[in-house]
Image: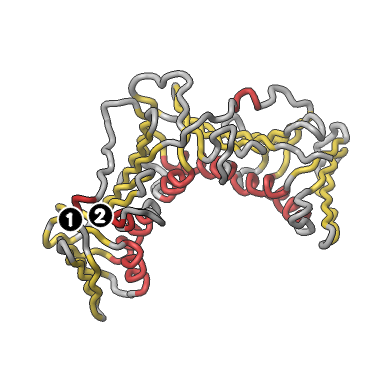
């Protein structure tokens, strides 16, 4: 295999595919990527056997078609350090030579036959299509709420993915908060079996999000009992699903909350961040006192001191209500919906979960802290 590539494009491709490469593995081949040169393209593949990606880099000058195993970490370092616009990869079975204007690098190769296959997308089965811009927004507004640690009761270390009728729905929770976002989708094929849970790992969600570069392109998504496939214009991502049972989220969402008020997203985010300055590891708490025309945010840390921040709410004429939250749970949500002018905050009292809604497509449920 011998190809000449634009350095910037190859660097981007290697960084994307490298996200799926195994960090630690007993199979040395998985620490590399497989490259296949054909026509005017170079296809790069990486996998850790749980998540895999096939990425096509186009506009490549292919002098000799073929396949090779490339040490991706070293290759990325070389591409970062050189200022050449183009580089040449000349790969044989045992050795890959990278030629630059300032010199060359030689790296060991590998047996391409040892590299695991990444499944192809099946156009004949059930799948749905989502616009990339819509999907990126949905991921941004939900993935942050997923748990980063394993749970003994529920499977929550991923994003629940559902598609039905003309809607795709993403849901994430760490059992202390829950984010849900819906968007339009074109669902094709047979209906999804009732009760089927598709919990996509966070690593896959991050990899998918990085591949959503063109807002207008259609992303095809195939959800299967134990795996999922995502097809963009240039990449195919395959993943195993998280095993286990996702919490019954529909029953958790309260149907009626008495207190409803509009909050300006940017201003509210600024006030929460200001009040949170005086929290510390022991006191991750901001108290909110809602009263006619305003909300007062207070925080206190044993070693840090205290803060009091007031935000006008001229339209609020509801009852006086006191409630406390972990400020980080609010900050992450408010950052996720940045760009929205307002959101609706719904509450019952200081002990029950609060809801934040943006239109009919997004809601965020957060547990208050005990008094």
Q: Quadrant of residue 265?
A: top right
Q: Which residue is mark 1?
A: 67
> Which residue sits at x=59%, y=29%?
360
Q: Which is nearer the eye, 24 or 46?
A: 24
Q: How many C-alpha atoms fall within 10 Å of the one at disc 1: few (<14), some, or many (≥20)?
A: many
The residue at the far front in this view is 26
Give whichever of discs 1 and 2 has the lower sequence position. Answer: 2
> Which residue sits at x=26%, y=81%?
102
Q: Quadrant of the N terminus?
A: bottom left
Say whether residue 170 is visible: yes
Q: Which residue is mark 2?
A: 34
Give above or below for 35 relative to 180.
below
Give above or below for 73 relative to 202.
below
> Which residue sits at x=67%, y=45%?
329
Q: Please give left or right for residue 294 compared with residue 339 in the image.
A: right
Q: Quadrant of residue 330?
A: top right
Q: Secondary structure at mark 1?
A: strand
Q: Residue 362, percent across and down?
A: 59, 34
């Amino acid at each position: 295999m011998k190809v000449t590539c634009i350095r910037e494009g190859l660097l981007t491709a290697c960084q994307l595919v490298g996200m799926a490469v195994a960090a630690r593995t007993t199979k040395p081949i998985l620490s590399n990527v497989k490259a296949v040169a054909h026509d005017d393209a170079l296809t790069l593949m990486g996998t850790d056997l749980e998540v895999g990606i096939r990425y096509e880099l186009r506009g490549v000058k292919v002098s000799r078609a073929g396949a090779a195993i490339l040490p991706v970490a070293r290759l990325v370092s070389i591409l970062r350090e050189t200022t050449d616009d183009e580089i040449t990869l000349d790969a044989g079975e045992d050795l890959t030579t990278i030629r630059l204007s300032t010199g060359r690098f030689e790296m060991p190769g590998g047996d391409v036959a040892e590299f695991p296959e990444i499944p192809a997308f099946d156009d004949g089965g059930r799948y749905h299509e989502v616009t990339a811009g819509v999907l990126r927004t949905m991921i941004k507004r939900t993935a942050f709420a997923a748990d980063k640690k394993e749970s003994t009761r529920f499977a929550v270390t991923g994003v629940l993915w559902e598609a039905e009728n003309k809607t795709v729905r993403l849901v994430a929770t760490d059992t202390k908060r829950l984010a849900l976002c819906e968007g339009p989708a074109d669902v094709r094929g047979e209906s999804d079996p009732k009760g089927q849970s598709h919990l996509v790992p966070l690593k896959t969600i991050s990899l998918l999000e990085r591949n959503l570069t063109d807002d207008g392109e259609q992303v095809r998504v195939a959800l299967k009992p134990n795996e999922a496939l995502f097809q963009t214009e240039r990449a195919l991502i395959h993943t195993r699903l998280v095993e286990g049972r996702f919490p019954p989220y529909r029953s958790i969402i309260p149907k009626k909350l008495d207190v409803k008020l509009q909050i300006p997203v940017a201003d509210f985010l600024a006030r929460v961040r200001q009040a949170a300055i005086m929290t510390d590891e022991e006191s991750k708490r901001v108290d909110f006192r809602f009263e006619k025309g305003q909300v007062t945010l207070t925080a206190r840390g044993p070693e840090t001191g205290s803060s009091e921040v007031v935000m006008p709410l001229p339209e609020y004429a509801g009852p006086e209500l006191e409630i406390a939250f972990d400020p980080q749970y609010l900050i992450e949500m408010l950052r996720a919906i940045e760009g929205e002018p307002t959101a609706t905050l719904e509450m019952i009292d200081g002990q029950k979960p609060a809801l934040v809604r943006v239109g009919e497509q997004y809601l965020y449920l957060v547990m208050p802290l005990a008094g």
